Amino acid sequence: MSGKVRKAVFPVAGMGTRFLPATKVVPKELLPVVDKPLIQYVVEEAAAAGVEEFIFVTSRGKGAIEDHFDIAYELHATLEARGKAEALTILDDILKEPGKIKSVRQMKPLGLGHAVWCARDLIGDEPFAVMSPDDLVLTKGSCIGELIEAHEQTGGNVVAVEDVPRDQTSRYGILDTPNAADRLAVVEGLVEKPKPEDAPSTLSIIGRYVLLPEVFEHLSKHERGAGNEIQLTDAMAKMIGKYPFHGLRFAGERFDCGDKLGWLQANMAYAMERDDLGDGARAIIDRYK
Ligand code: UTP
């Protein structure tokens, strides 16, 4: 089963404990990389891929994420009065058509699978994207766009994958596949956070997925997995053999911005890509060599 992917779920209800104290009152998803919040990068990536509805799974204390995508009237009025056209364009670019951004609450942080399940009524019976704002993918195109294109060809579930060093497999969901070297790997099994010696490959899943709505049938059982959390990987694993399932080696470089060093690296990489900041960023790197 394939179909047009119109909706994307953004799980933003986690506690961001690895980034304390920064995330005590500021949601992790609003941390900036250079000058833009993480969540805005992923929403833009989705929009570039033709996604029309943006569903945030939020929690208490995360209201600023919704505010970020709303009009800030006082700021607009002040910038208008001062003739700051460039700043106004930056603000206008954030906005979506009214009604296209929706949110639901995940009342307890029971895991990524549970967060996605909370969006079930807003998704209904169609394939959809899941995008973690922790993962930024620096690429000319759109990472989720690549997955959507693959889904249109193969149907079924498609997840973004990349190679990780074998000694790090216990941090990721790992693929069991007969063709790990190919761009599109057939998924025959999924293992959440295996020890290096037990890992069936070194292809790890990153935070970009195109999923069939059937995943909700499995998530609704609320079975706990690794870390006593309701894991999205476990629900996806139950669909293997029943529907097509592929891992896609995407183009571009991925940064784990839920991790301090990953986030620092993203700041440097994104700054170096920019015409206005590239030279300055390179000079800083040279200085601290
Ligand atoms: P993480 O496990 O990386 O996020 O989940 P976290 O729990 O906020 O971070 P740490 O480990 O405590 O530092 C990846 C994404 O899934 C969301 C998070 O908000 C993050 O964007 N998430 C995670 C939920 O929405 N609900 C959950 O129950 C867990």
Image (cartoon, helix red, strand yellow):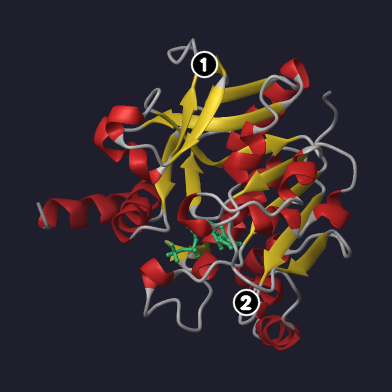
Q: In the figure, residue 246 lies in which quadrant?
A: top right
Q: Residue at x 49, y 11 (%)?
A: 178
Q: Is 287 on the left-hand or right-hand side of 80?
A: left
Query: Would residue 273 be visible to someone looking at this image?
Result: no
The reply to whether discs 1 and 2 touch (Cβ–Cβ < 8 Å) is: no
| For marks 1 and 2 on the same chain, the one whose residue lies earlier in the sequence | 2
Residue 171 percent coordinates (x, y) = 37, 45
| Amino acid at circle 2 | Lys
Front residue of 69 and 144: 144
| Amino acid at circle 1 | Arg
Is residue 9 depicted above or below 14 in this figure? above
Is residue 186 depicted above or below 89 in this figure? above
The crowd level at tag 1 (other Cα within 10 Å; few <14, some 14-19, many 20+) is some
Residue 107 percent coordinates (x, y) = 69, 74
Front residue of 33 and 101: 101
Residue 75 percent coordinates (x, y) = 67, 84
Q: Secondary structure at mark 2?
A: loop
Q: Is 19 on the left-hand or right-hand side of 210?
A: left
Disc 1 designates what residue? 183
Q: Residue at x 62, y 33 (%)?
A: 237
Residue 144 percent coordinates (x, y) = 63, 37
Q: Residue at x 50, y 17 (%)?
A: 177
| Count of numbered circles on the image | 2
Q: Is 225 on the left-hand or right-hand side of 107?
A: left
Q: Is 53 on the left-hand or right-hand side of 251?
A: right
Query: Would residue 44 be visible to someone looking at this image?
Result: yes
Label ID, residue 62: 2
